[in-house]
Image (cartoon, rainbow, N blue to C red):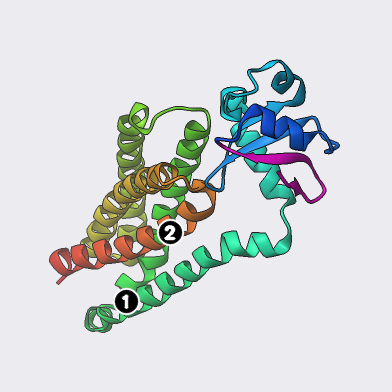
Amino acid sequence: MAATGDFPLVTAAAGETVAAVLERLAGAPGEDVVVVDRGRVVGLANRSELRVADRRAPVEEVMEPRLTDVLEARLAAEEPVARRLVHRLPWLLIGLAGAMASAILMGAFDARLEANVVIAFFVPAIVYMADAVGTQTEAVLIRALAAGVRTRAIVTRELLSGLIMGLAVGVAFFVFAAVGWGDARVAIAVALALVASCSVATAVAMILPTIFQRLGRDPAFGSGPLATVVQDLLSIAVYFAIVSVVVF
């Protein structure tokens, strides 16, 4: 068992017996033990509860699992800079690679852009709206997972919400593009791309956090940057595919 820096809790590995934990807890100042399984916080055990438990039982039988999300938040808030970089920087580098891929993808449609430069004006709007819808869905899902709610309990409502929001912003943007630039075909392409990209972004935002949780990883660290990369690439690809059909 090791102390976590200035953090007032100590940790124990899942599978340790209550007797072993109590023996090592004797010289520790805290009253609580964070139970960790393969690097992930799975619960909290109190010294007084450990003392009255079966000494041969594994510590996870005594722990309180409902506080897991609170413990992870506290540990993440107080971890040193080096650990913060380890947790976050790799995903940001993946995001950087995604930005490079986006540039390459845009370059593949340079002929379309040269033929009608107006279509380039709407790329930021489509990418932003997809990211915004996906971020909302991801926030709802991560909170639900932390509360023990299964993905399948909310998947239908979230997918339907993503579709309806895509339709709403698509209609609004169609009017804006048609009136502002006077090109009905481009306006239709933008509207259809918004509907499609918002729907796809919702699906991506549901899938990635669920995968991270099943792999025993914290979805708050990796799923956000990775989802953004996937959503951006798909939004750009969908937009130019629709433009190729509707405008040209």
Q: How many neighbours does mark 2 have within 10 angstroms: few (below 14), some (14-19), or many (20 or more)?
A: many
> For the N terminus, which image quadrant?
top right
Residue 21 locus on image (x, y percent): 69, 33
Residue drawn at 46 percent across, 67 percent down: 95
- Judging depth in this view, the residue of 106 and 113 nearest the camera is 106
> Who comes first in sequence, dot 1 or dot 2?
1
Q: Considering the numbered disc 1 on the image, is that residue within a helix, a strand or a loop?
A: helix
Principal secondary structure, stretch drawn in magenta:
strand
Residue drawn at 52 percent across, 35 percent down: 143
Residue stretch rendered in magenta on the structure: 1-14
* Residue type at tag 1: Met
- Judging depth in this view, the residue of 55 and 183 nearest the camera is 55
Q: Quadrant of residue 149?
A: top left
Q: Is residue 24 magenta?
A: no
Q: Is residue 13 magenta?
A: yes
Q: Residue under circle 1?
A: 106
Residue drawn at 32 percent across, 76 percent down: 106
